[in-house]
């Protein structure tokens, strides 16, 4: 593989990609992330560019591989297809696109909207495949599954109980519209655990503890995308014309 573009949030892992690629180009909307990478990584084989994925500053047919990890859930549904079409434009014929995104069937209850305010849309495996197939002719979707202990940690991190999802959070959002912030603050203090948080990610395990305890053996890829898989991975190919 000669080239690669990676619009992603996973900046600390870029060094391992540089071991295998002739050149890497990365794009992000965060100026802080771009400055961090420009300082940390060599400029000889990498380029870090401030921008968004809707209008990529590259010529058509530039890249062999494009990777987008945990990004598409941040893009509004109305523009998600534009994002994919733009990625396809900058790929070479025969190029590969690899995408990851959280599995909504693990994180969300029926009719629940994403609790993460930065997530515009979280996908089920069928929804993701349908969307990817609108831009690419060859599409496969896989689920990232984990051991029972890892899965338990992830469920505790991201999943809210039904009562809090369907009663507490809607009530709190309604009160936010009518009550002053000082009164809301007192309500959260007196309500204790009931109003303590309006989103998941409760007590996540630190990266140091997680990596020391678990390994690749605790994960597997499943083409059937079971309901409790942690993430979804889409692998798409741009057919040669």
Image (cartoon, rainbow, N blue to C red):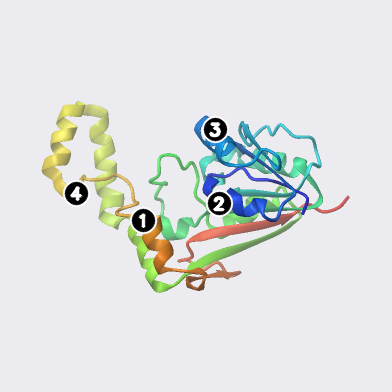
Near-viewer residue (215 or 192) = 215
* Residue 233 position in % (x across, y down): 59, 58
Instruction: Give the crowd class for mark 4: few <14, some 14-19, many >=20 residues within 10 Å.
Output: some
Q: CA distance from mark 3 to mark 2?
A: 16 Å
Q: Residue at left 59%, top 35%? A: 38
| Mark drawn on residue 206 | 1
Q: CA distance from mark 1 to mark 2?
A: 17 Å
Q: Secondary structure at mark 1?
A: loop
Q: CA distance from mark 1 to mark 4?
A: 25 Å
Q: Nearer the viewer, mark 3 or mark 4?
A: 3
Residue tagged 2: 13
Residue tagged 3: 35
Residue tagged 4: 194
Instruction: Give the crowd class for mark 2: few <14, some 14-19, many >=20 residues within 10 Å.
Output: few
On the image, which quarter does residue 236 sit in?
Answer: bottom right
Q: CA distance from mark 4 to mark 2?
A: 37 Å
Q: CA distance from mark 3 to mark 4?
A: 40 Å
On the image, which quarter does residue 26 sit in?
Answer: top right
- Reading the chain from its start, which is encountered first: label 3 or label 1? 3
Q: Residue at left 54%, top 45%? A: 11
- Reading the chain from its start, which is encountered first: label 3 or label 4? 3
- Reading the chain from its start, which is encountered first: label 4 or label 2? 2
Q: Is residue 189 above or below residue 126?
A: above
- Reading the chain from its start, which is encountered first: label 1 or label 4? 4
Q: CA distance from mark 3 to mark 1?
A: 25 Å
Residue 109 seen from this side: no
Residue lying farthest to the left in this orientation: 190
* Residue 57 position in % (x across, y down): 71, 31
Does the CB distance between marks 3 and 1 fall below 8 Å?
A: no
Q: Secondary structure at mark 4?
A: helix
Q: Secondary structure at mark 3?
A: helix
- Reading the chain from its start, which is encountered first: label 1 or label 2? 2
């Amino acid at each position: 593989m000669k080239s690669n573009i990676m619009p992603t949030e996973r900046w600390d892992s870029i060094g391992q990609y540089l071991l295998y690629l002739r050149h890497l180009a990365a794009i992000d909307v965060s100026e802080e992330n771009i400055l961090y990478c420009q300082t940390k990584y060599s400029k000889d084989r990498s380029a870090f560019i401030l921008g968004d994925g809707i209008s990529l500053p590259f010529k058509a047919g530039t890249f062999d591989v494009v990777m987008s990890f945990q990004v598409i859930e941040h893009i509004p549904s109305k523009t998600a297809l534009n994002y994919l079409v733009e990625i396809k434009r900058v790929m070479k014929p025969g190029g590969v696109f690899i995408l990851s995104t959280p599995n909504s069937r693990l994180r969300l209850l029926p009719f629940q909207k994403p609790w993460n305010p930065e997530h515009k849309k979280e996908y089920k495996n069928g929804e993701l495949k349908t969307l990817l197939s609108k831009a690419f002719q060859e599409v496969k979707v896989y689920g990232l599954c984990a051991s029972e202990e890892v899965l338990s940690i992830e469920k505790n991190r991201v999943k809210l109980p039904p009562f809090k999802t369907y009663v507490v959070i809607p009530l709190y959002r309604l009160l936010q519209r009518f009550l002053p912030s000082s009164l809301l603050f007192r309500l959260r203090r007196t309500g204790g655990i009931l109003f303590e948080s309006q989103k998941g990610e409760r007590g996540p395990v630190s990266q140091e503890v997680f990596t020391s305890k678990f390994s690749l053996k605790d994960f597997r890829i499943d083409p059937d995308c079971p309901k409790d898989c942690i993430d979804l991975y889409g692998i798409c190919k741009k057919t040669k014309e």
